[in-house]
C-alpha cells in the first residue's frame, strides 16, 4: 500500500554523521579488525552475531555500494534466529571502516581483507551472501577461496552486464568525486524509491537515506566522497560477469525483477539507457551462466527485496540455504 504523503514531507532535516559514520547506531556491537594494507594502518568495522541455538554454520554478509553492514539488520535477525552465526563487515572505504586517502581498490583486495578478518575470528567455512555491489565482491570471494565457501548467495547483484562494453561512457575518478560531493538526502530518497523499492515508500526506509546522506552532510564529506568515487571506478572497470561460468560453488540468486540498476546509466546514450538494468532478463541469463545456480524471483520487488518485503524474502532465503548434506551436491 502506497502512503499518500510526499517524500519531502516525510523527511526530517538530514543528520550529520562522521566520516566513519560516527553517530549512526548499528543493531549489534561493532567490533574493529585492525590490519596493515598497502602501507597503511586500517580498521574494518564488523558485527559478529552468535545465535542462541547454533546450527554450526556461518553466513558472511557483504553490503552494496550505497549500503552498510547495518542495512543487513533484518537479515541478521532472521539468520540468527534460524541458528546461523552472522558476520557482517563494512568494507574499507565504506561506512564505519577506514577511508584512506590513497588506496588501490579492487575486488581482490577487498576479498583478501575480508578473508583476513575471518581468519582472525576463527571462521574457516562460510556461506557468502552479497547484495548489489556486494554480489560482485561475493563472486570474487568465491572464486578466490572456493574451498572456504559452502554456498554463494547473491541478492540483486550489480555487474550482471558489462556496462563499459555495452557503451556506458567512462567517467574519471575526479568526475565521480564531483558528483558524489553533490549527494543529498532528497536525491538519495528519490533514487531509492524508484530503484530499491519499485516506486513504493514507507517511513522506515528513511533510516537508510539518513545513513547514506548523513555521511555526505558531515565534516568528513570530502574523504567520504573521494572513497566513493574510487569504488565507483572499481565497480565500472572490474566486471565479474565473464567469470560466472568458473564458479564451483552452489549459488542462490534472489532477484527483485523491478530493479533497474546500472552504474552510469544516466550518462549513457538514450537508446541504450532503456536497455540497461533489466533484471527480469538478467536474472535468468545469469542463472544459465553459473554451473550450479538456483534462481528465485520476486516479480514485484526492486533492488532491495530484503528491506522492501523482509518476511517474504527471508523465507525464500532460509528455504534456499543448503544444509550440510546438500553442500556440493549437484542441483536438479
Image (cartoon, rainbow, N blue to C red):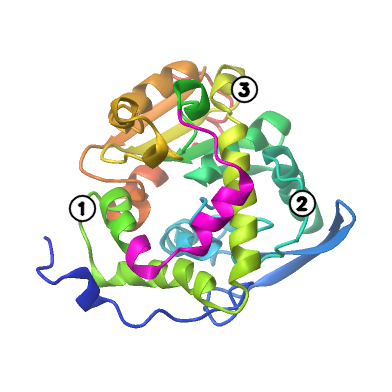
- The disc placed on residue 103 is 2
Question: Residue 258 in the image: x percent, y percent?
Answer: 26, 40
Q: Which residue is mark 3?
A: 248
Mark sitting earlier along the chain (2/3): 2
Tell me the residue at 29%/59% (across/down): 190
Tag 2 and tag 3, C-beta contact below 8 Å: no
Q: Residues within 10 Å of mark 3 (few under 14, many from 20)?
A: some
- How crowded pointer 1 is (Cα within 10 Å; few <14, some 14-19, many 20+) is rated as some
Most distant residue in the right direction = 39
Task: Say if 104 sits above or below 288 in the image.
Answer: below
Q: Residue at x 86, y 51 (%)?
A: 38
Q: What mark, if any, has residue 30 been given in the picture?
A: none
Instruction: Determine the secondary structure under disc 3.
Output: loop
- Please name the predominant secondary structure of the magenta segment in the image: helix
Q: CA distance from mark 1 to mark 2?
A: 36 Å
State the extent of the magenta-drawn residues as a range. Answer: 168-188
- Residue at screen point 58% across, 61% down: 225
Q: In the image, is residue 232 above or below residue 166?
A: below
Please name the residue that numbered disc 1 is placed on: 199
Q: Which residue occupies the foreground of this view, 118 or 155?
A: 155
Give the Cα separation between the discs numbered 1 and 3: 36 Å
Amino acid at each position: 500500500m502506497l502512503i499518500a504523503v510526499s517524500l519531502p514531507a516525510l523527511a526530517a532535516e538530514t543528520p550529520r554523521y562522521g566520516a566513519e559514520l560516527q553517530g549512526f547506531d548499528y543493531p549489534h556491537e561493532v567490533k574493529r579488525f585492525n590490519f596493515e594494507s598497502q602501507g597503511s594502518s586500517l580498521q574494518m568495522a564488523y558485527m559478529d552475531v552468535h545465535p542462541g541455538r547454533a546450527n554450526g554454520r556461518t553466513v558472511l554478509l557483504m553490503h552494496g555500494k550505497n549500503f552498510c553492514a547495518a542495512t543487513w539488520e533484518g537479515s541478521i535477525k532472521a539468520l540468527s534466529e534460524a541458528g546461523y552465526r552472522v558476520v557482517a563487515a563494512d568494507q574499507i572505504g565504506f561506512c564505519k571502516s577506514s577511508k584512506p586517502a590513497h588506496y588501490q581498490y579492487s575486488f581482490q583486495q577487498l576479498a583478501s581483507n575480508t578473508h583476513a578478518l575471518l581468519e582472525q575470528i576463527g571462521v574457516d567455512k562460510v556461506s557468502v551472501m552479497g547484495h548489489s555491489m556486494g554480489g560482485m565482491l561475493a563472486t570474487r570471494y568465491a572464486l578466490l577461496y572456493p574451498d572456504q565457501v559452502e554456498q554463494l548467495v547473491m541478492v540483486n547483484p550489480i555487474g550482471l552486464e558489462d556496462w563499459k562494453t555495452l557503451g556506458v561512457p567512462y567517467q574519471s575518478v575526479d568526475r565521480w568525486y564531483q558528483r558524489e560531493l553533490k549527494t543529498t538526502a532528497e536525491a538519495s530518497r528519490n533514487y531509492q524509491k524508484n530503484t530499491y523499492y519499485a516506486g513504493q515508500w514507507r517511513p522506515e526506509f528513511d533510516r537508510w537515506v539518513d545513513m547514506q546522506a548523513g555521511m555526505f552532510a558531515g565534516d568528513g564529506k570530502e574523504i567520504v566522497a573521494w572513497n566513493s568515487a574510487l569504488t565507483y571506478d572499481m565497480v565500472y572497470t572490474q566486471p565479474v560477469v565473464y567469470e560466472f561460468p568458473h564458479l564451483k560453488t552452489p549459488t542462490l540468486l534472489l532477484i527483485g525483477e523491478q530493479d533497474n540498476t546500472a552504474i552510469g546509466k544516466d550518462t549513457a546514450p538514450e537508446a541504450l539507457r532503456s536497455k540497461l538494468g533489466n533484471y527480469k532478463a538478467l536474472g535468468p541469463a545469469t542463472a544459465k551462466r553459473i554451473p550450479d545456480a538456483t534462481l528465485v524471483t520476486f516479480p514485484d520487488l526492486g533492488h532491495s527485496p530484503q528491506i522492501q518485503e523482509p518476511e517474504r524474502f527471508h523465507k525464500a532465503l532460509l528455504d534456499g540455504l543448503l544444509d550440510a548434506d546438500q553442500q556440493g551436491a549437484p542441483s536438479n
